[in-house]
Image: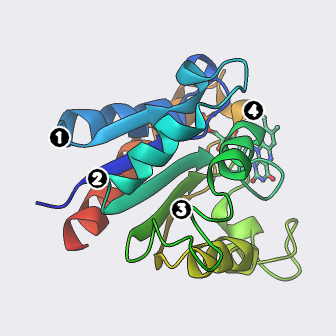
Amino acid sequence: MKRILIVSGHTDLNQSFANRIILDKLQSILPQAEFALLDKLYPDFCIDVSAEQQRLTGADVIVLQFPFFWYGMPSLMKKWMEDVFVHGFSHGSTGDKLHGKKLLLSFTSGAPEEMYKHGGLQNYTIEEFMPAFKQFAVLCGMEWQGYVYTGGLSYANRNDEEKLEQMRIKSITHAETLLKQIELL
Ligand SMILES: Cc1cc2nc3c(=O)[nH]c(=O)nc-3n(C[C@H](O)[C@H](O)[C@H](O)COP(=O)(O)O)c2cc1C
């Protein structure tokens, strides 16, 4: 059976709407998976590097779950990446610990999907923000499995009951799509 690791990079899940729903759904359907909620583990941003490296080496499938913050991953997840994926572990001539593992991204954005286009408010497609993630996978010898993405999950909608309900449905649909994708790996 494949060993699944889901790493949450949200900086404060207590304030989350979408990522919290997605993670709750994943936890109920995948009780055998390991969940690393970085905001709970490292509220002070002091990452336990060897614990995180162990977690990664023990997984076959690694899912990075996060909200899109300034067109990339949140600071806490970036810190985790910078501390944990070090030369000799994940890359470099002797850094082969992650070779063959599958990497899948799962993320949400505030701007709706249709704004991510040329000439739209966000000017670029979501795909055009992916090269750094793909190359991260390639350099570490991981197999890039693409991403599950949902937009329109904005903080601005939180006081509108109807929009909140739409966001709830979108978040659940996101989790279901992700679960199907994980099953195929
Ligand atoms: C610091 C910060 C940066 C953000 N940057 C972006 C961004 O670059 N693009 C975007 O579409 N949404 C952006 N957002 C909106 C978040 O992506 C959105 O609120 C999040 O995906 C919702 O997930 P949550 O309910 O789990 O927090 C940003 C929000 C914050 C707080």
Q: Residue furthest front?
A: 94
Label 3 and label 1: CA atoms lie apart by 24 Å
Q: Amino acid at mark 3?
A: Tyr
Q: Nearer the viewer, residue 49 or 152?
A: 49
Residue 152 is left or right of residue 182, and the answer is right
Position of residue 157 relative to residue 86, above or below, is: above
Q: Are marks 1 and 2 in contact (CB under 8 Å)?
A: yes
Q: Which quadrant holds the C terminus?
A: bottom left
Label 1 and label 2: CA atoms lie apart by 8 Å
Q: Which residue bears the numbered disc 4? A: 156
Residue 174 is left or right of residue 118, and the answer is left
Q: Nearer the viewer, residue 145 or 24?
A: 145
- Lower sequence index among marks 2 and 4: 2
SS of the residue under disc 2: strand
Q: Are marks 2 and 3 in contact (CB under 8 Å)?
A: no
The residue carrying mark 2 has its beta carbon less than 8 Å from ligand 1:
no
Q: Which residue bears the numbered disc 1? A: 32
* Disc sitting over residue 4 in the figure: 2
